[in-house]
């Protein structure tokens, strides 16, 4: 089992940027795919982005493609989500997840970090 801890959330104005981090620990902390999901109030959890173990393959939901970038540093057991040109509709709790493959399923989850974008 991999333990995941997110950080980097906060309050930002529309058009601003944030970088989220997802630190992993545990027996297989550097292996497998990583993904970011988000859940806004009153809405279902939504896939945002995913990255393969090597970092060579990434996937994004259409609404963030070109604005968000997922990356990872396996030496630091950390995945990142760089978010630029933020919009109020990006406001949500962002959670990191780990799984064997980039397409899921994702069996390990972090507690989440709040991102609030003001207009």
Image: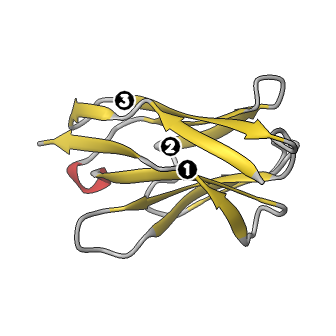
For residue 110, side relative to residue 39 (left or right): right
Along the polypeptide, which appears first: circle 3 or circle 1? 3
Percent x, y of residue 119: 11, 42
Element on which disc 1 rests: loop
Percent x, y of residue 6: 51, 38
Which residue is label 2 attached to? 68
Along the polypeptide, which appears first: circle 1 or circle 2? 2
Percent x, y of residue 104: 74, 70
Element on which disc 2 rests: strand
Which residue is label 3 attached to? 17
For residue 49, side relative to residue 114 (left or right): right
For residue 80, side relative to residue 53 (left or right): left
Which residue is label 1 attached to? 110
How busy is the neighbourhood of tag 1: few (under 14 within 10 Å), some, or many (20 plus)? some
Give the residue drawn at x 87%, y 42%.
Answer: 27
Q: Residue furthest left?
A: 119
Give the residue drawn at x 26%, y 47%.
Answer: 87
Q: How far apart are marks 3 and 1 (CA)?
A: 22 Å
């Amino acid at each position: 089992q991999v333990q995941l801890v997110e950080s980097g959330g906060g309050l930002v104005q529309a058009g601003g940027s944030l970088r989220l981090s997802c630190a992993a620990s545990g027996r297989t902390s550097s292996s497998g795919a990583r993904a970011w999901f988000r859940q806004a109030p009153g809405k279902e959890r939504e896939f945002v982005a995913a990255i393969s173990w090597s970092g060579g393959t990434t996937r994004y939901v259409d609404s963030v493609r070109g604005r968000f970038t997922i990356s990872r540093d396996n030496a630091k057991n950390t995945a990142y989500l760089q978010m630029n040109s933020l919009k109020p509709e990006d406001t949500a709790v962002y959670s990191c997840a780990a799984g064997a493959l980039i397409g899921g399923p994702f069996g390990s989850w972090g507690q989440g970090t709040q991102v609030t974008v003001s207009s």
